[in-house]
Image: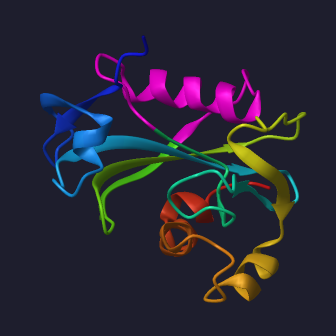
Amino acid sequence: MKTEELFPLVNEAGEVVGTATRKECHSGTFWLHPVVHLHVFNSKGELYLQKRSMLKDVQPGKWDTAVGGHVDAGETILEALAREVREELGITNADMKPLFVYPYRSKTEYELVNAYYTLYNGDIFPDPSEVDEGRFWSLDEIREAMGKDILTPNFEMEFEMVLKSPIFASINF
């Protein structure tokens, strides 16, 4: 029998204040729980995006951040990030660096997003159970797709934050 996933509940400072099931967190309670995102850039300055599986219950078939996933109860942010990167893209050797942390409220949940980036030119092996496809996009291609229901709304918002981040300006592609 499969046990239900447990997520940590956090305050806006990221401090754990409790736990709840995935179902509870996604049922409109708006309990704040941490997630991780990874933006994967290559040396050409292109950004890897994944096309969400059509089987996903949220934003199926839309292009999204290279990696995104929930932190499990008892797991650190970096442990969750490494697990999600390994599961979704098959990458085990990326040098992941923090970008920013922000709260994001959707129609059904409230997440504390821990966004990271990496420069990566190695092989990527997307998990077909999670991702329909993936590829590197030029920043101009992403800008062209904005607002056309091709990208997830959360990615569009976060992409703008990445471009405005002082850290982004310091990346040497």
Q: Nearer the viewer, residue 130 or 139?
A: 130
Q: Residue furthest top?
A: 1
Magenta stretch in the rendered image: 70-97
Q: Nearer the viewer, residue 106 or 35?
A: 106
Quarter of the image that includes the C terminus: bottom right
Q: Residue furthest front?
A: 1
Residue under the point 18% across and 55% down: 30
Report how many numbered discs are placed on residues in the image.
0
Q: Is residue 121 left or right of residue 78?
A: right
Q: Is residue 118 left or right of residue 36?
A: right
Q: Is residue 86 left or right of residue 138?
A: left
* Figure check: 49 above or below 82: below
Query: Residue 89: image x %, image y %?
Result: 74, 35
Query: Residue 9: image x %, image y %?
Result: 18, 36
Q: Residue furthest left?
A: 17
Whether 75 is among the magenta residues is: yes
Q: How is the image coloured?
A: rainbow
Quarter of the image that includes the N terminus: top left
Q: Is residue 68 left or right of residue 8?
A: right
Residue under the point 66% across and 88% down: 148
- Which picture quadrant has residue 126? top right
Query: Residue 74: image x %, image y %?
Result: 29, 16
Q: Nearer the viewer, residue 146 or 130?
A: 130
Query: Residue 10: image x %, image y %?
Result: 17, 39
* Figure check: 33 above or below 100: above
- Which picture quadrant has residue 127? top right
Whether 118 is among the magenta residues is: no
